[in-house]
Image (cartoon, coloured by chain):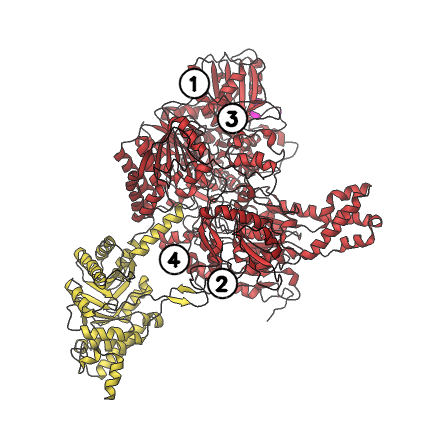
Chain colours: A yellow, B red
Amino acid sequence: MDLTTTYMGLKLKNPLVPSSSPLMGKLDSVRAMEDAGASAVVLHSLFEEQIRHEAHELDHYLTRDAESFQEAMSYFPALGEYKLGPEEYLEHIRKVKTAVEIPVIASLNGVTTGGWTDYAKKMETAGADALELNVYLVATDPKETGAHVEERYLAILKEVKKSVKIPVAMKIGPFFSSIPNMAVRFAEAGAAGLVLFNRFYQPDINLESREVTPNVVLSSSSSSRLPMRWIAILHGKVKASLAASSGIHTHEDAIKMLMVGADVTMMTSALMKHGVWHLASVREAMTQWLEQHEFQSVTQLKGSLSQKSCAEPAAFERANYMKALASLG
Amino acid sequence: MQFKKVTIDGNEATAHVAYRLSEVIAIYPITPSSNMGEWADAWSAEGKPNVWGTVPSVVEMQSEGGASGAVHGAVATGALSATFTASQGLLLMIPNMFKIAGELTPCCLHVTARTVASHALSIFGDHSDVMATRSTGFALLCSNSVQEAMDMALVAHSATLDSRLPFLHFFDGFRTSHELMKVDLLPDEIIRKMVNMDAVAAHRARALSPDHPTMKGTAQNPDVFFQARESANAYYDKCPGIVQAAMDKLGELTGRKYQLFDYVGAKDAERVIVMMGSGAEAAEEAVTHMNKNGEKVGLVKVRLYRPFSVKDFVAALPSTVKTITVLDRTKESGALGDPLYLDVIGALNEAIAAGTAPVKTMPRVLGGRYGLSSKEFRPGMVKAVYDDMKAAKPKNHFVVGIIDDVSGNYLPEDTHFDAESPKAFRGLFYGLGSDGTVGANKNSIKIIGEETQNYCQGYFVYDSKKAGTITVSHLRFGPEPIRSTYLVNRANFVACHQWSFMEKYEMLEAATPGATFLVNSPFGTDRVWDEMPQEVQAAIIAKKLKLFVIDAPAVAQKTGMGSRLNTIMQTCFFAISNILPKDEAIAKIKAAAKKTYGARGDEVVKKNWDAIDQTLAHLHEVKYPGTVTSKFRRPPAVAKEAPEFVQKVTAEIIAGRGDKLPVSVFPVDGTFPLSTTAWEKRNIALEIPVWDPECCIQCGKCSLVCPHAAIRQKVFEPKFMKDAPATFKAVPYKGKEYDGWNYSLQTAPEDCTGCALCVEICPAKNKTEAKYKAINMKAQLPLREEERKNYSFFLNLPEADRRAVKVDTIKGSQFLQPLFEYSGACAGCGETPYIKLLSQLFGDRSLIANATGCSSIYGGNLPTTPYAANKEGRGIAWANSLFEDNAEFGMGYRLTMDKFMELGKELVKKLEAQLGSELVTGLLNAAQKSEADIAEQRERVAALKDKLARMEGPEVALLKPIVDYLVKKSVWIVGGDGWAYDIGYGGLDHVLASGRNVNVLVLDTEVYSNTGGQMSKSTPKGAVAKFAAAGKPLAKKDLAMMAMTYGSVYVARVAMGANDVHTIKAFLEAEAYEGPSLIVAYSHCIAHGINMVKGFEQQKAAVNSGHWPLFRYNPALSGTEAPMKLDSKPPKQPLSEYIYNETRYKMLTKSDPARASALLAQAQSEVEARWQVYEQLQTVNFTGKSKN
């Protein structure tokens, strides 16, 4: 069975790409993913804000009570150099590149223009085959227009594109008024790929303590519906690869995504839940399904049920309620 | 030879040499020598080699006694070894010093000479510790300055090998150890040349070795000991010559020439002072000045004090000498004179008799004492000494530098005498510890020292408190060498880095006419003048000062510097003082910031650079009127209602005038009154908690956790509200026990440190806006006046009846009056809530033995102390003996209490006929288990006193003074982990094994907090600490488990933040247990590198992660049920979630991530294994039967 696909110009042996998760921080896990059949990996994100915060935090606590009391000029030994920049992450890229043969996609979340471009360049130098920009701008200012938010996204992409030669993907959220319009603009601005969608951190409420609590919920298969619709709509309309992310747990989930037009399917929660070897069983089941349904290749499958190619294009445009009415008729 | 110029302090200078010439270094922290060990440890951790290319082994021991033992063993087996210490630490080394010297074994001991504790502890400098080692047989070599500390350290290491005598090299604690000075760095090339490798080989050849075995340390008897002891005399005879030869060689290599006794002054001097230490520098400054004025005075600086070379001493004296005054920086009570004085008399006597002296008849020799505990010693005092030598009847055995109005035998300083170079810049900088003033000034002095031709000096004075601390930096620089070993007392530049100091300190007293005054002020150029108190305005006008103002916090705010004003104020200083061209100065300041903060990332450097760039636009000169226009004066240091002693003594110390207090005002035996912090209104909180009674559930948690007893609750009958101030808040009490009464929660606005722990712990949230709680932080200044009145009213409300209070609940315990209040501990301290709780539960009948450390400093450091008495006059009797003996000291209390109780009962029984059977039976059989029991016994004792007052006879006389001991006393032994796990462990173990009814409270911060974060055996695996820079590789000692093995010790491990009720229960059970009790209390600490407001949350995480399982082991239950009760749940969160909230762990992930990860993995499995052991322990009944 020919499972090969092309994502951002990278020839991949199959469409199964484990994406950004804490598992990516461990070299052994990345190796295991390759062994389980991953065709590429997206490393965990480098957060510029966190790097900055950690530097300030360390400086704060090392100096806070120093030179204040006669018997204690400081409270910690001087340890010489600290690894406070992106060095640890860059070193990880280098190690992963040596450890595996599949393409390695680095992921970046910046907060300043300098941070985006500087770190992107360093990631490229460290050996990343491609870059995924994990952009999330939660617009909270009522005075900021949607158009302005869109410009901010595009500005980041353009700056990064100027500084690197490797392909760049935009990982975006679903909260644009016109996703197709944005997708086209991203592609025009140089995005080689679009990753749909970023699952934003969603705070929860602890009812007893009446506090907002940080909460990371693993996805389920049902989360895949949202990207599935939009990939179906975008397929064939955008000159950029499409990656499906969110809710891909089973071979069925992956196949559906490919059918609507995804070039690759990205998996995180399922691997967190079932372990890295889950990937091998998904690949196996996908192959079997394709064989059973007499498909020759993934290429054949890709986009076969996109809005452009499906029997009822309007199905992707209607809301569920309307679909229910229609079926009555 | 061109030397590299460096600006370093005496500790670094000494450590530089000691490290390069040692193979084995054993260390233990003690102020002010700790830094030498820290340097050695840091260099060793970095892999820096000594001059022979090998990295010295640096090992922390459990005490100075241990360090000296390790050094003894190392040199006995042929290594080159050194250690560093001071004061009590040196005293602990004395037994080994006798041994090392008796065995003629080379080694070097570098000592920052520090006061030995007597009537009080002092961390400051004098020679009392060194003088206590005179009889050990060590050679004693003294340095007077930072350069000399480096040079003499080298002479000591060189001469010890050639002479075989061990050397104690010393210099003045703080004055030299902590003074920054521009010096020539000795290169390896010279250091190597100073060592005789044949002597090294001979030392190795003499070593204990199984390949050529010998033995040492035999036991000798009357027949031979004496002769054998005398056999080494020749080595002492030769030693001075060897030292002089080493000095000569150093002179050849460096150009700096030293003599065993260095003479400076007029060749034909008639008046000569003999002294040693840093004071000799100030004396030389005075001599030089007086010589210029034609006065025939001179000075002998003693360098090699032991062995004392009579020949070399008399050779140093001018033949014209008529009067010699020997100045000692130590006190030997009861002696004929202080030690150097007696040595000089003896030396002259011998030399004159032998005809080897430059004089034929005995000159007049006088003795004086100066400088105890770093008391200032200035040229004006030296002048006074020389002047008095001219008198027909000069004073002898006098003191100088203080007013001894009791004996009258003191020399007043000549305050007009100024021996300093007029070309020198002299600056005073007043800052807060937290604003980075000292760090900035250290950088400034380094810039000036290393980037200009100027000589320079920096010295820094700190607060005795740990929260809201003031620092004063004393900076000098100029074209001539600086010998001014005293604080800047004539300043041509004064900087006030905190506006709040305007009302607190007399900053301008030292300002010279025309000096510059730089003020950091939130008020612009137009308002700053009017906001100053009258005293400050008057001084500015009278001295015609140049006034500059900057709003540094505004610049800090803009540039993300927070409370750090350091680089901003530093930039102002360089801009105003014009030491360097502006652009060059800014470039240097930036380079210094890069050097200091570069390791912490570009971001940190950038914000400092931004601050430097934005400063000058905010700096302005202020023109002021010629008359005082301010409407207010500086408030008095204490309220007028304060007791006489507080007014007369404490207030003066608070106001910074302690130096001027005469001898007569002080207690003769170090006994001080309680409750003095209540009079020192520090007003250091920017924000204080404000109560919202509507929201409050009256749980008492805020009061429980307050480290400073600055938020309190009371219940009282509504009738007491009659005269309440208008803004005083009280609401009906929620609960049955005080039905119909009022409840009030009140902040002490001027005592609160603003740590906000109370707000953090408050469980009640506002119903409409969840960000608000039942207490919320609000700006202190606008509230100060009204809350001061409210607090005063609150304090006068009646205290709760202890008999009725439910002491085993949080709420109930917090109705008990705290007898530990407003301590100088760090804001948000994790230790003090435990001590405060102790004081509430048992304070009116407790004695505390307190080990030296943080708790003795915030508990007992002047000017004001937090232990307090209640309205009946009962409170905590507190004392600090030493660091190492605290358990034994407390045991002594217990023995007395038990004996007095026993004796009292015996006497009461004997007097039964006169006292009446009912009273006697009551007194003898009183249960004294509850507050009600105690109250009843107190009533019986009152009745007994009443009867005894009308009785006579020997038994009555015996009974009267001890009658109060018939009421049960609670003995508490309190200290930190440095004491309990390390230096005091032997004694603690013995006391726990004694079966006596003592209560031990270990405030476990898992590190030596007071001396700056050195590793203790309590430090957990993976935590970074000084002496464990690479993360501690071994697990924390389980002290609680070790104590449990006795089976007869009550043991509890508590963490107030994780389970407050458990903590209270453990305290009550420990106190009730009629035997030894040990409470190990998790105490979060600034040395953990945490946000202190999250301290209690970290305690919770420590418990939830299994790092700190809570339990109680009560032997009283043994036989009926398992005595061990685990009181926390199995580990439910990964250790990483707890530890990586703390800098002490997290910094290792940034310096050595692989090691951090490996240590974490080990620590995680150890947590799980320990939990399993505990779980099994709680099933064992210790009757041999298992619960299951």
Q: What residue type is labelled 4?
A: Ser
User: Is mark 1 in CB contact (under 8 Å) with mark 2?
Assistant: no
Which residue is identified by label 2?
B1169
Disc 1/disc 2 C-alpha distance (Å): 72 Å
Identify the residue position indicated by label 3 in the image.
B305
- Measured along the vertical axis of the image, is residue B966 above or below residue A42? above
Label 1 Cα neighbours within 10 Å, binned few <14 / some 14-19 / many ≥20:
many
Q: Name the residue under label 1.
A: B289
Q: Give the number of the mark in front: 1 or 3.
A: 1
Discs 4 and 2 lie in a common subunit? yes
Q: Is the magenta stretch mostly helix, strand or loop?
A: loop
Query: In the drawing, what numbered circle is on residue A270?
Result: none
The local crowd at label 3, few if under 14, some if 14 to 19, many if 20 or more residues have their Cα within 10 Å, is: some
The mark nearer the N terminus, 1 or 3, is: 1
- Which SS class for mark 2? helix
- Disc 4 or 1, which lies upstream in sequence? 1
Among the two numbered marks 2 and 3 on one chain, the one whose residue lies closer to the N terminus? 3
Which percent across, then down, holds residue B1045? 60, 58
The chain identifier of the residue carrying mark 1 reads B
Q: In which quarter of the image is the N terminus of chain A?
A: bottom left
Per the model, the C-alpha gap separating discs 4 and 2 is: 19 Å
Residue that extends furthest to the right in the rendered view of this protein: B913
* Closer to the camera in the image, A42 or A193: A193
Of the residues shown, which amino acid type is indicated by label 2? Answer: Ala
Q: Name the residue under label 4.
A: B1157
> Percent position (x, y) of residue B577?
33, 31
